[in-house]
Image: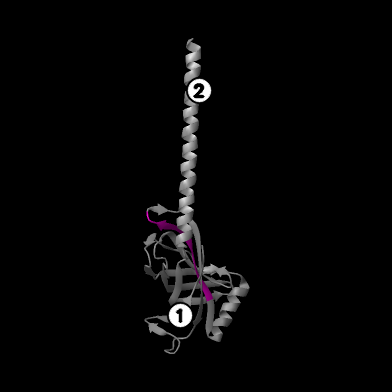
Amino acid sequence: MSEKVCSHHKSKRRKVLKKCCAGLLIFNFILLILILLIWAVLQPKKPRFILQDATIFALNVSAANVISTTVQVTVYSRNPNSKIGVYYDKLDVYATYHNQQITYYTVIPPVYQGHKDVNVWSPFIYGNNVPVAPYNGLALAQDQNNGGIKMTVKIDGRVKWKVGSFISGRYHLHVSCPAYIPLGNSKSTGIIVGTAVKYQLAMSCSVSV
């Protein structure tokens, strides 16, 4: 008799567990559907970036394949969404020349960007005696002689979206800002700031998330 009672109790527990699991799965499914619907209605847009200016402190070739660079850039970022906030977990800023990195990473600390908010960052990016491919060093010296350099300021990092109290997972952020920098300490090409020269650029950046 006691074995039958135990068997009956076990059967009840199994039924209760099955109901709980089924209820939990249904709840999670409904929650997922609601999140997807809200996401579709809000239609999140990528942040917008503009490279406003670049101040050149040093940019030279000390050998055929060694480049030294010290540049301060001003980057404008705007969140175009009216109901979605953006968490920037970490942003690494650096410069490339002919698709080759010529500066070290400079880290922009984590920051939250609210609805329609704007952030402006002015990091220094630098690299001392950075070895590059020989043809890049020669190309840079030739560009200097021609009076202008095409480089790219890049930003890599991770972002999270905030909708109400919901915060999404992390997404990779890649920003690429082309910059043509005319060289020469003349008032027609730049503003002399001490030993540096500041160039107004106002270049739109491509953004992928």
Q: Main secondary structure of the magenta part?
A: strand
Task: State the residue at coordinates (40%, 57%).
Answer: 163
The answer to which quarter of the image holds residue 197 is bottom left
The one nearer the camera, 119 or 165, is 165
Task: State the residue at coordinates (50%, 26%).
Answer: 14
- Is 17 left or right of 99, judged from the image as shown? left
The residue type indicated by label 1 comes to Leu
Residue 42 magenta-highlighted: no
Residue interval drawn in magenta: 151-164
Secondary element at tag 2 = helix
Q: Residues within 10 Å of mark 2 (few under 14, many from 20)?
A: few
- Is 65 left or right of 15, judged from the image as shown? right
Secondary element at tag 1 = strand
Q: Position of residue 129 (x, y in %)?
A: 51, 69
Mark count: 2
Q: Residues within 10 Å of mark 1 (few under 14, many from 20)?
A: some
Residue identifier under label 1? 201
Name above or below for residue 85 compared with residue 68: above
Callout 1–callout 2 Cβ contact below 8 Å: no
Residue 163 magenta-highlighted: yes
Mark 1 or mark 2, whichever is nearer to me: 2
N-terminal of the pair, mark 1 or mark 2, is 2
Name above or below for residue 105 compared with residue 140: above
Q: Position of residue 196 (x, y in %)?
A: 41, 80
Task: State the residue at coordinates (42%, 69%).
Answer: 77
Q: Position of residue 39 (x, y in %)?
A: 47, 57
Determine if residue 169 is in view. no
Residue identifier under label 2? 11
Q: Position of residue 114 (x, y in %)?
A: 36, 63
